[in-house]
Amino acid sequence: MKQLLASLLLALAIALPAHAQLLAPAAPASQPLDRIVAVVDEDVVLQSELDQAVASVQQQYAAHPEQLPPQQVLQKQVLNRLVLMKLQIAKAHEQGIRVSDADVDQAVAAVAAQNRITPEQLRMEVERSGDSYAAFRSQLSDQLMVQRLRQSVVQSAVTVTDSEINNLLSSPTYKAGEVHLAHIQISIPGGADAAAIQASAQKAQQALDAIKGGMDFNAAAIRYSDAPDALDGGDLGWRKLDEIPPAFAETLAPMKPGDVSNALRGPTGFHILKLIGQREPSKQIVTEFHARQILIKPSELMTPAQAEQKARDLYDRIVNKHEDFAKLAKEDSDDDTTANAGGDMDWFPQKAWGATIAAQLGNLKDGEVSQPFQSEAGWHILERLGTRQSDQTVELERGEARQAIGNRKAEQAYDDYLRDIRSNAYVHIVVPELRDADTDSASS
């Protein structure tokens, strides 16, 4: 269970906020005081934060310690991520992004569910491991803030037009399907001169030579990559081929699973790609439902109880008195999108109208009318009219193309945003052995 908890906390450990050390037990008088290892604008990174984050990574890789780089390299990797996390949290605060206790409760429940335990069991495991549950919740809160910051940045920076989708699908270079990738990224500092670019190129070649010499790709990513996913072995998961920059897709085309690319020059640095797996697209056949509904909404003039009773009265008129469903829908339904059409919802995939209606559809037969049921919108009466198999390949292909273009733009937009806030921040690494050539920066 200790190993499970380490896995659970890995992504969170590098986000441990500075104030978390206030939640830990007081150190005995014989121990040295906590020291500052980095100054990040108006915040700091403490030695205790760095030690705890490094320890979490080491615990995650306890079964494969050979994949970890030397201690000093690992400390630099983790410190860089702590710095970037603090900068993102500061920006989130500046933008007025807030996370409520209820949001954190929901995140705790999600983490517990993913690990098939209850929230209370999760709390017990956190405390049994020697960590503070309050600090754990604080880490989750920080992660949620960063997610919302990213959403805010991406929403304002990324749009996808129909013409872009058409151009992508009609392009001779368009490729359907997915690939599972891992990567190593060696960044080039903003405003770098020829010497700095050459140093990054040499580091990329060192990583490539190490892999060719037998080093596991995940271990090489942990040791050499400076991408945010380095501590996950550079794993990018499954990606649509058209989410990948065209130059990289061309490189991947002749590769087979297990192959590793040469070092590729990109707009932000050098990349080494490993193709883990690939899969072709398949025809997308989905079951569509034809249905109609009557919706009764509570309002200032109708209490929830009165809305329920009205729905039950209408159900009785339809089922027992055999009144016309469409006529009653036009007269009584509060659903603006379907009432004028006699409640007709047209053909749609099962979950298109939400989980509550989807569940009812699955329990009905064609021609059957549901008992009144409640959703967030109000009280529904649903009649299932029919089902059919529909080829959604074209529609899904357009949806996937839109998502691929959006994901590519979003990734680039947020990467540019992180580079910008990092280059414009004051960052001073106090401990000399943890400094890189381009680690310290200051801006007015």
Image: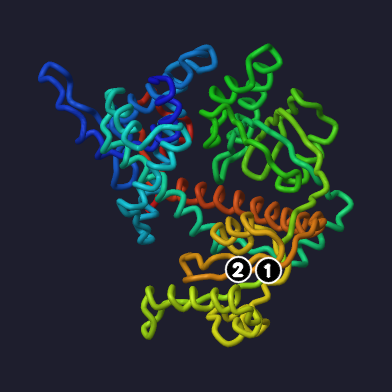
Q: How many marks?
A: 2
Residue located beneath label 2 in the image: 382
113, 102: nearer the viewer = 113
In the image, residue 407 sits, relative to residue 338, either above or below, namely: above
Q: Residue at x 60, y 81 (%)?
A: 329
Q: Looking at the rendering, which quadrant does residue 289 occupy?
A: bottom right
Is there CB contact under 8 Å for labels 2 and 1?
yes
Q: Is residue 70 left or right of residue 337?
A: left
Residue 189 image offset from top left, x and y in percent = 55, 40
Callout 2, which amino acid?
Answer: Leu
Callout 1, which amino acid?
Answer: Ala
Residue 410 image offset from top left, x and y in percent = 60, 53
Local packing at callout 1 (Cα closer than 10 Å; few below 14, some 14-19, many 20+) is many
Local packing at callout 2 (Cα closer than 10 Å; few below 14, some 14-19, many 20+) is many
Residue 79 image offset from top left, x and y in percent = 40, 31
380, 364: nearer the viewer = 364
Residue located beneath label 1 in the image: 291
Image mark for residue 363: none
The span from disc 2 to disc 1 (Cα, nearest Å) is 7 Å
Sequence-first tag of 2 and 1? 1
SS category of the residue bearing label 2? strand
Q: Is residue 251 left or right of residue 157?
A: right
SS category of the residue bearing label 1? strand
Residue 165 image offset from top left, x and y in percent = 77, 61
Q: Residue at x 76, y 24 (%)?
A: 259
Q: Residue at x 70, y 66 (%)?
A: 367
Q: Looking at the rendering, which quadrant does residue 321 occupy?
A: bottom right
In the image, residue 214 sits, relative to residue 291, either above or below, namely: above
